[in-house]
Amino acid sequence: MLCRTGVGSVYVSDGYINRRTIIHLQNMCENNSMSRNVYTFLLYLLLPFTPLKLLWRARKQPEYLAHWQERYGFYQFNLNKPVIWLHCVSVGETRAAEPLIKALLAQHPNHAILLTHTTPTGRATSEQLFGNSVSRVYLPYDLPFAVERFLRHFKPAVGVLMETELWFNLIAGCQQHSIPLLLANARLSEKSAQGYGKLGKVARQGLQGLVAFAAQTEQDAARLQNLGANNVSIIGNIKFDVAPQEDAITKARLLRKALGNLRPVFLAASTREGEEELILDAIAAAGIPNLLTMIVPRHPQRFDAVAELLKKRTSGFARRTSLGSDAVVSPQTCFVLGDSMGEMFTYYASCDVAFIGGSLLPLGGQNLIEACSMGKPVLIGPHTFNFEQATEMAIAAGAAERVQNSSDLAQHLQALITNPGKQNAMRDAALRFSGESRGATERTLNLLNQYL
């Protein structure tokens, strides 16, 4: 149950509590020793609507109807080893946890690794990354009866929540069952900290129910401590330790050959709704001869919508999934839709300059670390509050440049594409920046081992 306040709504797995409800919750929680009961009562009010929400989401993603029983705490298999459990909400958290999960598999072969997710895309990502080496289920809604079923069924020896998760009944359940629960790769923006602060005692009690925090930065640690967190360590960002898939470079060479080795290639990665139009405007304004642009939407359910936009706005485009091993993109084709899953390293390796989406509009930005680790010059928009520290560090290192709007993106892109020397300097800076920032996985593993 991911509660995000201060951004207009609180996301409750597959349902929503609106701003008015949260204001009411805040008022009821202040100076109220039974504050978690109020929180739970509100969730019970939402419970009858959760099947409708699943059906609504299944219109675009039928996978939401698969394994629906797990969301209420009913599971079809048992694990016969001691369980190390990690919760990774969706794609981003699952990819971020990859180095830690691989380290746990290597160091604890007598344990079973259980991953829990909230979204089908997160679950699909864990299947791609880990196959049968781990088990995976949906974490149930944050209701006491569902949480109790989950904990009694799997009996985890330790639990790890990734990045920004506060599930208050889950935390309380782990305390009751004496299951140590940690928050790893923890990040908390100023905006999110203000929102959690408005929840008063609910948030404070939740944070104090966790046994340890592995914060990414000093700022994240300070915000967590100000909200009441104890035992906070500054560990760094595990995402710097994420390595490309073994075949990523080989696939990138084939992709670049298909795109054209002599053409300049621009990648717009992890774009969000409303950004593609702005990017197309920037490409038109830049006027770069023979430029080929790859657009990779953040969410796979938007692939077809972006394809429709490209049909309307361009003279033609190709889909990544249509490019076979011997395919060659026509010189007249100036756009490729990245409609494949699990290939971000391949996309980064095959481009000359990368723009990181979610940042032209006030959506908080996306992770630029993968692009830097592949030695690519990075452009990023003004809205990066979800990844502020990493973004500022990359800019200070000379690995990234910030653009303010679509026209600014056009100018920066033109300046980079036409200046190979600057591209090379930013490539070198990106590799240094990403290389010097590694090591968080080992430090997180050492912390986690204290509770096993």
Image (spheres, rainbow, N blue to C red):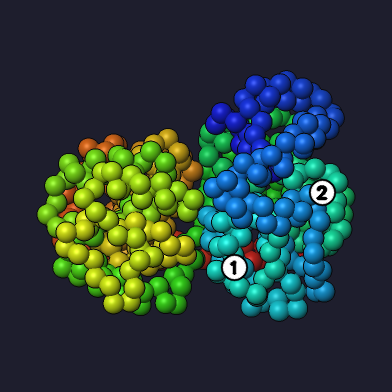
Which of 396/209 is in front? 209
Which of 137/345 is in front? 137
Indicate the quadrant where residue 408 lies: top left
Q: How many marks?
A: 2
Q: Is residue 41 left or right of residue 424?
A: right
Vertical arrangement, residue 404 with respect to residue 330, above or below:
above
Which of 30/51 is in front? 51
Task: Tell me the crowding category of disc 2: few under 14, some 14 to 19, or many 20 or more residues within 10 angstroms, Cα based.
Answer: some
The earlier-in-sequence mark between 1 and 2 is 1
Residue shown at 84%/29% (left/top)? Answer: 33
Residue shown at 65%/34% (left/top)? Answer: 16
Which of 38/268 is in front? 268
- What's the amino acid at mark 1? Glu
Residue 27 x %, y % = 73, 20
Task: Specify the quadrant that holds the N terminus.
Answer: top right
Marker disc for residue 127: 1
**Does the image show residue 340?**
yes
- What's the amino acid at mark 2? Ala
Task: Tell me the crowding category of disc 1: few under 14, some 14 to 19, or many 20 or more residues within 10 angstroms, Cα based.
Answer: some
